[in-house]
Amino acid sequence: MTSLFDLRGKTAVITGANTGIGQGIAVALAEAGANIVAVGRSSMNDTAELIAPHKVTFQAVAADLGSTEPVAHIVSEALKVTGRIDVLVNNAGIIRRADALDFTEADWDAVIDVNLKAAFFLSQATAQSMLTDGRGGKIINIASLLSFQGGIRVASYTASKSGLAGLTKLLACEWAAKGINVNAIAPGYFSTNNTQALREDADRNSAILGRIPAGRWGEPSDIGGAAVFLASRASDYVHGITLPVDGGWLAR
Ligand code: NAP
């Protein structure tokens, strides 16, 4: 019997796959057999090296998701690998920190553009292509604990990630019957570039660690299992959820 989690022959597009959580997801999907299209604005060489042992096709696509301009190009490049996109992971994201009283419009727009607007329009273009042969696919949005909680000093980030959880539900409602599963993963506190400032602040670091039941920060390798689940037929009847992978943070 083939595994419920088998992704051999599938093509997965992952944005922001050069580092951190996106890289962890790309490696896990490749281990399950998926061909990888790694989208981003930085070199994908490290990710290509990590994926090489899995003997899948690897394609890097250079794109800055600060605007929607590269969306059509990303889809057309991804379609060159196997002729269809089976999985899209909207992972690219940024964060800007400032008190709400001082938060600038530039920091608002920059975060919303990458975390929310690019994710929506790339999902739209990918879904259009997934539906041309009627086979559907899987879309996974990388949300956050701030899809559930308020946070502090990250107004546009909280708005974007709460928006992404809502968008995940809306797209699930519109596309579930068409064969596209739209779900999200909410990582807890992961050790990546995104959280470097928090880990370097001794007080914040120990406050965060003290609240995580697992007693440690997440590593990019901790996120892959949830992504493989949501990318595979194991999740065919799962629609619109935001799945926390947080070491138990939300259970506290
Ligand atoms: P990260 O190491 O900073 O990775 C962010 C990724 O997004 C990088 O690949 C980055 O590319 C890419 N990116 C940012 N702006 C982009 C743009 N304009 N165009 C294309 N790519 C762009 O942080 P991470 O923690 O792995 O973050 C990945 C996702 O997880 C983000 O959506 C983040 O909000 C989410 N998340 C992280 C945590 C955590 O604790 N780390 C928790 C919850 C959610 P460059 O390297 O070129 O900048």
Image (cartoon, grey):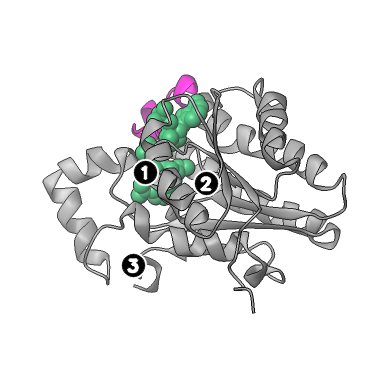
Q: Where are the magenta residues, as a range?
A: 94-107
| Disc with the residue nearer the chain's start (1 vs 3) | 1
Q: Which mark is residue 125?
A: none
Residue 57 showing in the rendered view: yes
- For label 2, count other residues whose C-alpha is less than 10 Å away and answer few (under 14), some (14-19) or many (20+): many
Q: Which residue is mark 3?
A: 247
Frontmost residue, 86 versus 102: 86
Q: Which residue is mark 2?
A: 161
Residue 124 placed where, x, y %? Answer: 75, 39
Q: Magenta stretch containing residue 100, yes or no? A: yes
The residue depicted at 52 percent of the width and 57 percent of the height is: 185
SS for tag 2? Answer: helix
Q: Which residue is mark 1?
A: 20
Residue 206 placed where, x, y %? Answer: 15, 56
Quick check: is the Cβ at mark 1 less than 8 Å away from ligand 1?
yes
Q: Amino acid at mark 1?
A: Gly
